[in-house]
Amino acid sequence: MFIVSLEYVVPIEEIEPHVSGHMQWLQKCYEEGIFLASGRKVPRTGGVILARGSRAALQECLMQDPFAIHELARYEITEFVASQTVPGLEGLKE
């Protein structure tokens, strides 16, 4: 499993025109079963995605994000193995 941390590298005003495309891309990744959860950072400096699959497939997926295509954000990928969860999230354990 992976935690993807997005960090905006441009002012938020440059992000706004691409949010709709980013949301469409997110939906596609959910439909493909790659993403498990996502959301904005607080304060709004980027976002976080919880993903599964192979690192190579994830990296390929991330390069299709409008934020990546337009060089608006950088991405840090952290792999981890969930060993404990709260009830209801057992499917996240490997």
Image: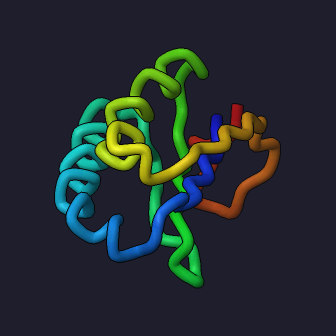
Looking at the picture, tell me which residue is in the foreground, 90 or 23.
23
Horizontally, residue 94 falls left or right of residue 18, namely right
- Give x and y (percent) for residue 59: 51, 25
Q: How is the image coloured?
A: rainbow
Horizontally, residue 39 falls left or right of residue 28, namely right
- Image quarter for residue 6? bottom right
The residue located at (64%, 61%) in the rendering is: 87
- Give x and y (percent) for residue 32: 29, 30
- Give x and y (percent) for residue 13: 34, 75
Looking at the picture, tell me which residue is in the foreground, 86 or 80.
80
Q: Residue furthest right?
A: 83
- Give x and y (percent) for residue 20: 18, 61
The residue located at (37%, 49%) in the rendering is: 67
The residue located at (64%, 35%) in the rendering is: 1
Q: Is residue 58 above or below residue 73?
A: above
Looking at the picture, tell me which residue is in the foreground, 50 or 18.
18
